[in-house]
Image (cartoon, coloured by chain):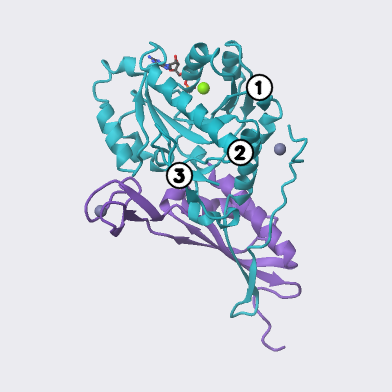
C-alpha cells in the first residue's frame, strides 16, 4: 500500500525540520487528511510506527485530523457537505461542483524537543 | 537529459514558522503537502516535457484493463503521424516494454518491485533513457492499481483512466479518488459488451458525473479496433494544445491534482486560463 511511501515522505519532512531546528526528538506530529486524498488514516498510523522507528520521530505521537468533504455548487452557489463518491450539490443536486475541502494530505505541525529537554519538562528548574 | 537542470532538488524551508507552544517546546507550523518532495520532482519532470514540447499522458487502470493493448493499437495507427515514446510501470518483468518495442517505438520499463505505483522520481530516472527531443507523445503506463497511482503526480499533463466492461460499471463510485482525477475515461473492451450485458456504459458515465468530473467517456475496443478514432482525435487535439502552450511558454497540469490546488501555495496561485478552441476540458496554468 502506498501509505508506507507517503509515510516515508512524511518522515523525511520531519527529519528536515528537526535538523533545521537542531531538535533531538519529536513529541507530536499533526497531519490533516481528507477522504479524497487517497490516504487511509488507519493505514497511515500503522505505517508511521514502522517508518518512524530509528528516526528522530521515533516515539512521537501522530495526530490525524480528518477533514470533511465540502463542495460549492457552480449552478446555485450553495456550499454543502458531500460524500467521496457523490460530490454533487446538496441543495440542487447538480454535479457541476468545485471541491472546497476533502482532498488534503498536509503536514500541519511538528512539535520538537530541543537538546537536553525530555518529553516531560522539568518544572524544578 | 539534465545537462541544464542538474537535477538537484533542495527542500525549501520558507514555509516554516516557529512558535512556542504551551509546553515551551517548539511547535513548527508546516502546512505542506505530505508528498511535496514528489510534487517538486513532478514539476521538474514537467519542465523537461515542456522544454521539448512533449505531451505526457498518465494511463491508469486496474490490472488487465487493456492499457498495453491500447498503446500497441495506437502506435500502429499513429506511428507515422507522431513520434511516440512509452514508459511502462509494472511490479516485475520487461514484458510490456518488449511488446511496445516490437512496434518500433522506444520504451523504458520501470519495475517497481513491491511499490504499487509510479512516483515522480522513478519517472525521472526513466527519462534519462529516452530522447525527449525525438518524442511528441510520451505515454506513461502506470502500475495496474485503482488506488495508489492517483496520489502521485508524475509530471504528466493529462490523466487517462481505463475501465474495461468486464470490471463493473460502478467502478468510478468504488474508486472515486482515481476517477475524479481522470481528464479522460476510456471504457475499453466494448467488443465484450454483448456478453457483459450487466455493464451499462451510461451508468459508468453517470458514476463519473457524480464525482463532479466532466471528463469525456469514450467507448472503444483495442482488439476489434472499434471506436479508436475518437481517442485518436482526442490525442491530436492534446498534441496541438501542448504545441501551442510550448510556444507561449505555458504548461498544464491535470484538472485535479492529487492534493488539491489550494495547497500549492509554494508554487504560486493557479490561474484559470480560457480553454483552447475545440477543447472544453479544465486546466490550470502553472
Ligand atoms: N476482448 C478484448 N480483450 C482485450 C481488449 N484489450 C485488451 N484485451 C485483453 O485483456 C488482457 C489484458 O490486456 P493488457 O493490454 O495487457 O492490459 P493492461 O494490464 O492494462 O496493460 C489481454 O489478454 C488483452 O488481450 C479488447 O479491446 N477486447
Ligand atoms: Mg500493461
Ligand atoms: Zn446547487
Ligand atoms: Zn532532470
Regarding mark 2 in the picture, which secondary structure is present there? Answer: helix
Q: Position of residue A95 (x, y in %)?
A: 29, 46
Sequence-first disc among 3 and 2: 2
Q: How many marks?
A: 3
Q: Residues within 10 Å of mark 2 (few under 14, many from 20)?
A: many
Residue located beneath label 3 in the image? B256
Does any portion of residue B173 appear in the rendered image? yes
Q: CA distance from mark 3 to mark 2?
A: 16 Å
Q: Residue at x 66, y 22 (%)?
A: B134
Residues behind callouts 3 and 1 on a single chain: yes
The chain to which mark 2 is attached is B
Regarding mark 1 in the picture, which secondary structure is present there? Answer: helix
Residue B134 is marked as 1
Q: Residues within 10 Å of mark 3 (few under 14, many from 20)?
A: many
Asked where in the image residue A59 lies, by quadrant, the reply is bottom right
The chain to which mark 1 is attached is B
Residues behind callouts 2 and 1 on a single chain: yes
Regarding mark 3 in the picture, which secondary structure is present there? Answer: loop
Residues behind callouts 3 and 2 on a single chain: yes
Q: CA distance from mark 2 to mark 1?
A: 16 Å
Residue B185 against residue A125 in the figure, above or below: above
Q: Is mark 3 within 8 Å of ligand 3?
A: no
Q: Left or right? Give the position of B45 relative to A32.
A: right
Q: Nearer the viewer, residue A49 or B130?
A: B130
Q: Is mark 2 within 8 Å of ligand 4?
A: no
Residue B165 against residue B261 in the figure, above or below: above
Asked where in the image residue B54 lies, by quadrant, the reply is top right
State the cyan chain: B
Quadrant, the N terminus of chain B: top right
Residue located beneath label 2 in the image? B46
Amino acid at each position: 500500500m502506498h501509505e508506507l511511501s507517503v509515510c516515508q515522505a512524511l518522515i523525511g519532512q520531519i527529519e528536515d525540520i528537526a535538523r533545521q531546528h537542531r531538535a533531538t526528538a519529536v513529541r507530536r506530529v499533526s497531519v490533516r487528511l481528507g477522504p479524497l486524498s487517497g490516504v487511509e488514516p488507519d493505514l497511515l498510523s500503522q505505517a508511521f510506527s514502522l517508518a518512524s522507528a530509528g528516526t528522530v520521530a521515533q516515539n512521537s505521537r501522530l495526530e490525524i485530523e480528518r477533514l470533511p468533504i465540502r463542495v460549492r455548487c457552480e449552478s446555485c452557489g450553495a456550499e454543502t457537505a458531500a460524500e467521496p463518491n457523490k460530490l454533487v450539490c446538496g441543495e440542487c443536486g447538480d454535479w457541476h461542483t468545485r471541491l472546497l475541502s476533502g482532498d488534503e494530505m498536509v503536514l500541519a505541525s511538528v512539535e520538537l524537543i530541543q537538546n537536553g529537554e525530555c518529553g516531560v519538562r522539568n518544572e524544578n528548574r | 537529459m539534465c545537462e541544464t537542470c542538474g537535477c538537484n532538488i533542495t527542500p525549501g524551508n520558507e514555509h516554516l514558522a516557529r512558535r512556542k507552544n504551551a509546553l515551551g517546546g517548539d511547535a513548527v507550523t508546516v502546512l505542506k503537502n505530505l508528498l511535496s518532495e514528489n510534487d517538486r520532482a513532478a514539476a521538474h519532470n514537467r519542465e523537461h516535457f515542456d522544454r521539448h514540447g512533449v505531451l505526457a499522458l498518465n494511463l491508469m487502470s486496474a490490472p488487465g484493463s487493456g492499457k498495453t493493448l491500447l498503446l500497441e493499437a495506437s502506435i500502429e495507427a499513429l506511428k507515422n503521424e507522431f513520434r511516440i515514446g512509452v514508459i511502462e510501470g509494472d511490479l516485475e518483468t520487461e514484458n510490456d516494454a518488449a511488446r511496445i518495442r516490437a512496434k518500433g517505438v522506444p520504451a523504458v520499463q520501470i519495475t517497481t518491485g513491491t511499490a504499487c505505483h509510479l512516483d515522480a522520481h522513478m519517472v525521472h530516472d526513466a527519462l534519462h533513457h529516452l530522447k525527449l527531443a525525438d518524442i511528441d507523445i510520451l505515454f506513461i503506463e502506470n502500475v495496474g492499481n485503482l488506488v495508489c497511482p492517483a496520489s502521485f503526480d508524475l509530471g504528466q499533463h493529462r490523466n487517462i483512466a481505463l475501465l474495461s466492461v468486464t470490471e463493473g460499471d460502478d467502478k468510478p463510485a468504488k474508486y472515486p479518488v482515481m476517477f475524479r482525477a481522470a481528464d479522460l475515461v476510456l471504457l475499453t473492451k466494448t467488443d465484450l459488451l454483448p456478453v457483459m450485458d450487466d455493464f451499462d456504459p451510461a451508468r459508468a458515465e453517470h458514476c463519473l458525473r457524480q464525482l463532479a468530473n466532466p471528463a469525456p467517456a469514450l467507448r472503444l475496443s483495442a482488439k476489434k479496433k472499434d471506436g479508436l478514432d475518437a481517442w485518436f482525435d482526442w490525442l491530436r487535439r492534446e498534441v496541438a494544445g501542448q504545441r501551442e502552450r510550448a510556444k507561449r511558454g505555458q504548461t498544464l497540469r491535470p484538472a485535479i491534482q492529487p492534493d488539491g490546488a489550494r495547497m500549492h501555495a509554494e508554487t504560486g496561485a493557479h490561474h484559470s486560463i480560457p480553454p483552447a478552441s475545440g477543447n472544453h476540458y479544465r486546466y490550470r496554468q502553472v
